[in-house]
Image (spheres, grey):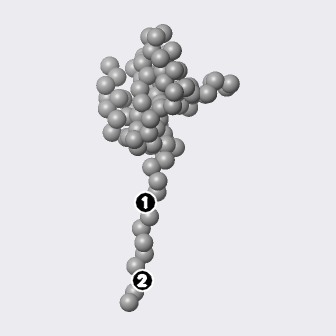
Amino acid sequence: MAQGRQRFKLPDLEINLEEKCRLYAEGRGALFFKFTVPGNPGAPDRLLLHKGKVIFVEMKRKGGKPSEVQLAWHKVLRTRGYQVEIVDDFGAFSNLLGSVK
């Protein structure tokens, strides 16, 4: 009996989603920068700049939820008038990018 090859699915890692979204955004004229704030954990992962808008994007693996410190950052940013979005799949990112007017 011939042995078949087993197929393994790569895990849905946040980094893979980030890269796919970055390439998609750049292909549509947007900028999608990695965002870090040294000494301040919990800041959103990315900045989406498109059509004059700035959107903070928290990337999560499928079904992932933000931590309490991340939610606190989101509140601070929203209080100051910024848009903050949580993205855990490519479809959500595609919809977000498409909604920017």
Image position, residue 47 (x, y; %): 50, 26
User: Looking at the rendering, which quadrant does residue 91 occupy?
Assistant: top left
Residue 3, numbered label: 2
Image position, residue 58 (x, y; %): 47, 30
Image position, residue 20 (x, y; %): 44, 43
Residue 54, numbered label: none
Q: Is residue 58 left or right of residue 95?
A: right
Q: Which residue is mark 1?
A: 9
The answer to whether 80 is drawn above or below residue 16 in the figure is above
Residue neighbourhood size for the residue with mark 2, other residues' Cα within 10 Å, grouped as few (<14), some (14–19), many (≥20): few
Report whether residue 51 is seen: yes
Could you tell me the amino acid type at mark 1?
Lys
Which residue corresponds to the image point at 45% horizontal and 15% vertical from the top-left? 78
Q: Is residue 13 left or right of residue 63?
A: right
Asked if disc 1 and disc 2 are in contact, CB closer than 8 Å, the reply is no
Which residue corresponds to the image point at 42% horizontal and 83% vertical from the top-left? 3
- Number of numbered tags placed on the structure image: 2
Which residue corresponds to the image point at 41% horizontal and 38% vertical from the top-left? 88
Image position, residue 21 (x, y; %): 43, 38
Q: Quadrant of the N terminus?
A: bottom left
Q: CA distance from mark 1 to mark 2?
A: 19 Å
Q: Secondary structure at mark 2?
A: loop
Q: Secondary structure at mark 1?
A: loop
Residue closer to the observer: 75 or 38: 75
Could you tell me the amino acid type at mark 2?
Gln
The answer to whether 54 is drawn above or below residue 17 in the figure is above
Residue neighbourhood size for the residue with mark 1, other residues' Cα within 10 Å, grouped as few (<14), some (14–19), many (≥20): few
